[in-house]
């Protein structure tokens, strides 16, 4: 996406944000709608908690399987840095394409598409259509999205599964409830 015409506009918009939005409320001159600075901070915190699954307990569940002498600080920092690096790279991709779309459509970059999780379904199909073998690239991209969703769902179910398994530890290992929990086949209908 960075080689497309207009990509530099999108990258500039991404890498040089309006820092006043962090500290001052903004009033839309057309609608009079007030967008508070607190909402920017709230959205940033929400994104952090969501991307690391901090509130759902998946990270804590996975760390509970480690031995007590495991270097937990190093692993937490590694996961956080890799996650943040991946998100930063994804931002480069998306905003370079947004810059391209801004130039092609002749509108300001903040009016190209609506914000939110649906952004990937508006921006990425355009980028994929510009690649060689767009059908193959689109298939693999949306397969990747499906796999990301499924693995995220499995990790969240694993947190609940771990709690139930620990609560039912008093049961015999060959008890039906333990066999069902340990098989993890019950996860599939939930996904």
Image (spheres, rainbow, N blue to C red):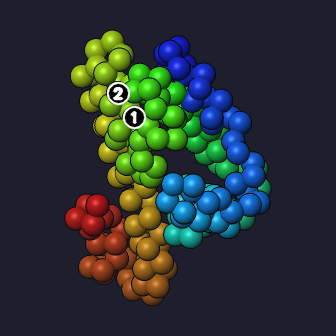
Figure check: 134 above or below 13? above
Compare residues 137 and 169 and report the one nearer the observer. Answer: 137
Whether the residues at callouts 2 and 1 have beta carbons within 8 Å, the answer is: yes
Image point 57% across, 56% down: which residue? 28
From the viewer's perspective, tell me whether residue 103 is left or right of residue 39.
Answer: left
Image point 32% across, 31% down: which residue? 125
| Quarter placement of the C terminus | bottom left
* Residue 89 image point, x, y percent: 59, 33
Location of mark 1 (residue): 123
From the viewer's perspective, tell me whether residue 12 is left or right of residue 32.
Answer: right
Image point 59% across, 65% down: which residue? 34
* Residue 170 image point, x, y percent: 45, 87
Q: How far apart are the alpha carbons under marks 2 and 1? A: 6 Å
* Residue 2 image point, x, y percent: 55, 19
- Please tell me the numbered disc located at residue 126: 2
From the viewer's perspective, tell me whether residue 182 is left or right of residue 24.
Answer: left
């Amino acid at each position: 996406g960075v080689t497309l015409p207009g990509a530099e506009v999108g990258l500039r918009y991404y890498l040089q944000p309006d820092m006043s939005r962090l500290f001052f409320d903004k009033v839309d001159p057309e609608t009079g709608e007030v967008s508070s600075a607190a909402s920017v901070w709230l959205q940033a915190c929400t994104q952090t908690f969501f991307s690391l699954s901090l509130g759902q307990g998946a990270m804590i569940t996975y760390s509970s399987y480690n031995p007590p002498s495991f270097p937990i600080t190093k692993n937490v920092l590694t996961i956080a840095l890799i996650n943040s690096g991946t998100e930063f790279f994804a931002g480069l991709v998306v905003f370079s394409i947004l810059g391209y779309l801004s130039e092609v459509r002749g509108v300001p970059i903040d009016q190209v598409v609506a914000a939110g999780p649906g952004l990937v379904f508006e921006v990425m199909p355009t980028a994929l259509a510009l690649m060689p073998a767009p059908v193959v690239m689109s298939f693999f991209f949306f397969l990747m999205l499906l796999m990301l969703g499924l693995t995220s769902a499995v990790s969240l179910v694993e947190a609940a599964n771990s709690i139930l398994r620990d609560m039912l530890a008093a049961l015999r290992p060959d008890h039906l409830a333990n066999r069902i929990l340990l098989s993890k086949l019950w996860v599939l209908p939930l996904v």
